[in-house]
Image (cartoon, helix red, strand yellow):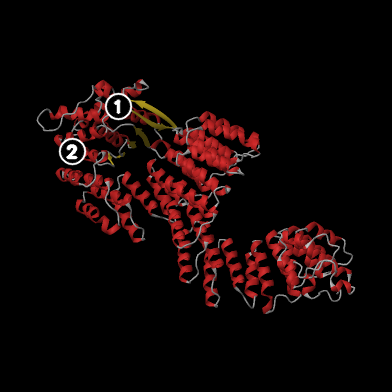
Amino acid sequence: RHGRLQEPAMALAQAPPPWLALSLDEARSAHVPHHARPVQETRARPPASFARGEPRFVSETKLITFHSSAGRLGAAREVFDGMGHRDLLAWSAMIGAYATRGIFHEVLALAVSMIGEGVLPDRFLITRILQACAYAEDQRLGSVLHSMAIRRGFMGRVKDVPVGNSVLVMYVKCGELGRARAVFDKMRRRDLGTWNSMIFGCCRSCQWEEARRLLDEMRREGTEPGVVTWNTLISSYARSGDLDVAVDLLGQMEECGVEPDVVTWTSLVSGFVHSDRGDEALQCFIRMRVAGVEPNGMTIACAISACASLKLLRQGSQLHCHAIKIGTVNNVLSGNSLVDMYAKCGEIVAAYRIFNEIPEKDIFSWNSMVAGYAQAGYCGKAYELFCKMESYGIQRNVITWNTMISGYIRNGDDERAFELFQTMESYGVKKDTASWNILIAGSVHNGYFDRALRIFRQMQSVLIKPDYITILSIIPAFANLVAAWKVREIHACIFHHNLEMDGKIANALINAYSKSGDLAGACAVFDRHSSRNTISWNCIIVAHLLHGSPTKVVDYFFKMKQQGVLPDHTTLTAVIRAYGMEGMVSEGREIFLNMDKDYNVTPDLDHYAAMVDLLGRSGRLQEAYAIIDEMPLAPNLTLWESLLTSARMHGNVRLALLAATEMSMIEPNDPRIQVVVSSLQDLAGQSFDVPKVTVHSKERMLGGVESCSTEIRNMVYLFSTGDKVASEHEAAELKLMMIEMGPSMLSAGNGTLEVEEEKEELAGIHCEKLAIIVGIFNSPHFRSIRIIKTARMCNHCHTFAKLVSEKYGRQILIKDPKYLHKFENGNCSCEDYW
């Protein structure tokens, strides 16, 4: 349009005219690129073309190029704006100057002005502008340039691959994967950059399978993936948390002869750290060092974070030395990781020293140090730093406030935690989901379950959406018999917010429904659970074991194996106990003897306790004792307790006293064990050769009063042994019931040893009887009575509950410290063995 616009390339590299205020030495000191520096060292003469009377606008274009190459972008723009006539070369020089320095908004503004003045870009300039559109994510202008490239014939030939790649990258960066794919499919020739861009787009849109398919396709078409291709896939999978696939891709990369670089290894180390797999992160770091790849600052920082999560002080200190060696110790990223590592390892002084040595502390530096003090219990020091932050120009963010709130509530200062929670928004910091989660989790941890539920409800009332951490924090608080309706309330919230598909939440729900007495609810959640893992199967197996359904336990065990899920330690413990409840000794023994070979699980104390229970239930007490006597591990309290239960149920005083004596040696300050030992010594007399254990007086032994709680009409009531019945009517009914059940009560506990802590004639009516009678007469329309008891049920109360369930047609659920008793139609789920 404007005639010949381009001069020979060397004309732009000739010596500057003398009227330019920049010497050659100044040009060199300004790091002017070699191709833009003067070739000749002549200062006095202007370029030959200038002497020939070169057009003024061509000389001005050279001025723009020279100024921009020397780093004087303002001067270049001043020359450009003063030009009376700007051709394509002038626009290219000015746009190129901005693009080189990453000032993309100016590139786009100049491109619009250029097209408005009737100057159209060539294939080289349009590529550069499209790159700016990609970085600025300006799809509107990018689409216009795409259309222009098609009309001007820049997209159809083999040599136009760079233009096609630029269009492809622009659509990918703007999130338009469908349009990017259309461009990709129409390209006649694709180079490695084309494939890399398309694979990056698929990874960015979480289309992992399509990215893997493209990798296979590019290899079939003869384009071998390079290190960038592999890094794109590996880093994307690592960031998404699918680290097993990322490691598999690393293996394929090495098989193809492509050496992983520091980016590859750093992506994997970082991915493992963010997935709380610190041990694997360190193993990956070691592999990188063995391969001879030098870590960079990011790699070191991630490895230090892995040491922080595992509290590995020695390894963290070694990495600290390495950071000093390669000069990244004062890097803010490495410094923050070091502060976190030393703080979590309890070296708070070292953490503070590193914090002071960070030259340019950012918000993460301050947050790490505040968290370090708070976690170490120095909330005063943490608050002191918290208050200093703004005086150093660091604006406290929501993480800072959450850290302080968490520190106070973890250290028992709930009042101060709630005060900060209430005032944070007055400082311009909006509460997020994590803020509420901290209060809920802290309340549950400190035993304030109802307060946790109130906070949970308030959170929803202010339209803060709970996440999976919220749910996992609050569910355990209500996994008990008197909170069944609260579990259903939380489940409704989970369903409303579409969180039920989360595997951890589904498992927690199964557990909560089971412990609240609703086995049907637990089964319903399990049946809808689409991604069952070992923990899911364990939850439903343990649920049926808790509710006295051993046949179902075995059925689920076989279904689990049929679906290819490998049983673990918990599964096998539950199955052995289920076989014990069924009286299937040989089957349970076979599982125990072959578990190492069949399931790669080494028997531990839980499995030995299950075996003692299995043999003890069937009356094989000597075999049960032999298991304990010959086992390679030191027996714990649970093992001796299993033997005590078996001996008591089968009337073996000598073995019961032996087990109780061993228990008292493990827990010498437990008053209930002392009472059992005392009772058994009274029964045994002096006829057995068992070491005599000195026990305290009964007044000292019975330091606490037994109590239980029950739910009536959505209200929880507490009863203690010896309490009076609330009304005369209830007292009369209780007396009448005791008289009517007298003959049956007399047969209670035949064949067993009576070693209860408190006899009713001494302490008064046991609390569970009070709870049952009040439940019967105050909740006539509710069939189920649910009771939580602090101590083991005695034989008389157990028989009483069975008879009441039969007479009044009620289901009575009583959870003591060891068993869930489900009384129905005169029977108990424990089959009178507890």
Relative side of 60 to 667, left or right: right
Mark carried by residue 647: 2
Residue type at mark 1 is His
Q: Does residue 436 appear in this view? A: no
Residue type at mark 2 is Ala
Q: Which residue is mark 1?
A: 766
Relative side of 764 to 252, left or right: left
What's the distance in space between the residues labelled 2 and 1, CA to CA?
25 Å
Q: Is residue 587 above or below residue 743?
A: below
Residue 694, image x, y percentages: 20, 26
**Disc number lying in front (2 or 1):** 2
Residue 16, image x, y percentages: 81, 66
Relative side of 489 to 132, left or right: left
The residue depicted at 83 percent of the width and 74 percent of the height is: 5
Q: Is residue 582 above or below residue 195?
A: above
The residue depicted at 57 percent of the width and 32 percent of the height is: 384
SS at mark 2 in the image = helix
Disc with the residue nearer the chain's start (2 vs 1):
2
Of the 4 image quadrants, the one containing the N terminus is bottom right
Mark carried by residue 471: none
SS at mark 1 in the image = loop
Residue 94 falls in which quadrant of the image?
Answer: bottom right
- Nearest to the observer: residue 73 or residue 791: 73
